[in-house]
Amino acid sequence: MHPNPESATTRRDFLQATAAVAALASVGAPSIVLGASPFTHMALPWGESALAPVIGAQTVGIHHGKHHKAYVDNLNNLVKGTEFEGQPLERVVMATAGKADRQALFNNAGQIWNHDFYWHSLKPGGGGKPPAALAARIDESFGSFEEFRKQFAAMTVSQFGSGWGWLVADSAGKLKVVKTGNAEVPMTQGLKPLLTIDVWEHAYYLDYQNRRADYVNAVIDKLLDWEFAVRNLG
Ligand code: MN
């Protein structure tokens, strides 16, 4: 299955990937720095038990140590011998998005990108109101913080099956809440991610079982790292 790096298909993929990364740059790179392969399993920004009782240590330990790690291990195996070996993670994500013959690469690359972003979106003692400048942007875009909060929770809870809820900025700078399924990322829609909440069941089932809304509301109110959103907004 490894493509011939000299093939026309590979060259076309590379041109598309270059265009995709340029598009990502215009969307705005996130404040987290993501390296080239071998892709790394990001260390948590806080201890495994730091988010308890909102998200328990067992959930964080399995989520980060098993699920997230598996995506990293899978991708490092999948890129071996392909043109993606040694490439930045963003390039793999953007170059494989929407391509049926690159689905496994995309799924694992997207999930690494999303998980790195998710861990940075959370902090112990987070939540509450954003800093003033971002709060003003939220008021402009949603009418009020309470309206944003309601829409973000509803959008995230409504993701059917596995996926992600996001606060994003569109190309005009308007803030929006969106959801993506499975490993999908907002950048492929020209949206700049500011914060995310993982609603795959592995993110909440040990702590909340089927009560996804309780998990989402608790994350919004007690864990969101608004300073991370400010850095991403730029
Ligand atoms: Mn997850």
Image (cartoon, rainbow, N blue to C red):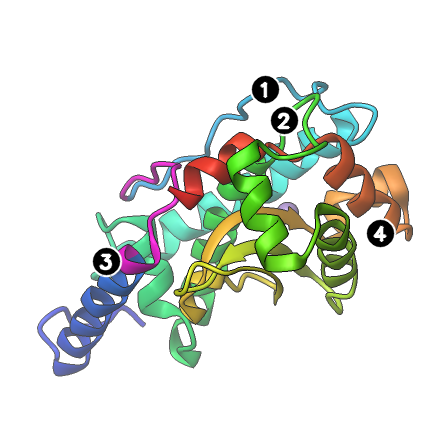
Q: What residue is disc 2 on?
A: 123
Kindly report which numbered mark, 2 or 1, lies closer to the viewer in this rendering: 2
Q: Report, in whole angstroms, how far the alpha carbon at label 3 lies from the one at label 2.
A: 38 Å
Q: Quadrant of the N terminus?
A: bottom left
- Taking the image as shown, residue 69 lies to the left or right of residue 32, namely right
Sequence order check, earlier mark of 4 and 3: 3
Mark 2: which amino acid?
Lys
Q: CA distance from mark 4 to mark 1?
A: 23 Å
Quarter of the image where one finds residue 12: bottom left
Residue 99 percent location from the top left of the image: 39, 78
Q: Between marks 2 and 4, how big is the CA–CA gap? A: 19 Å
Task: Please tell me whether mark 3 or mark 2 is closer to you in this view.
Answer: 2
The nearer-to-camera label among 2 and 4 is: 2
- Badge 3: few (under 14), some or many (20 or more) residues near its Cα, within 10 Å? few
Judging depth in this view, the residue of 211 and 84 nearest the camera is 211
Q: Which residue is mark 4?
A: 212
Q: Are marks 3 and 2 in contact (CB under 8 Å)?
A: no
Q: Amino acid at mark 4?
A: Arg
Verify whether residue 32 appears in magenta. yes
191 left or right, relative to 28: right
Q: Residues within 10 Å of mark 2 (few under 14, many from 20)?
A: many
Magenta stretch in the rendered image: 25-36
> Does label 3 or label 1 sit earlier along the sequence?
1
Separation of marks 2 and 1 at Cα, in angstroms: 7 Å
Lower sequence index among marks 3 and 2 = 3
The residue lying toward the viewer, choosing from 122 and 90, is 122
Total of numbered circles in the picture?
Answer: 4
Q: Which residue is mark 1?
A: 46
Q: Residues within 10 Å of mark 4 (few under 14, many from 20)?
A: many
Helix, strand or loop at disc 2? Answer: loop
Mark 4 in CB contact with mark 3 (< 8 angstroms): no
Mark in the foreground, 3 or 1:
1
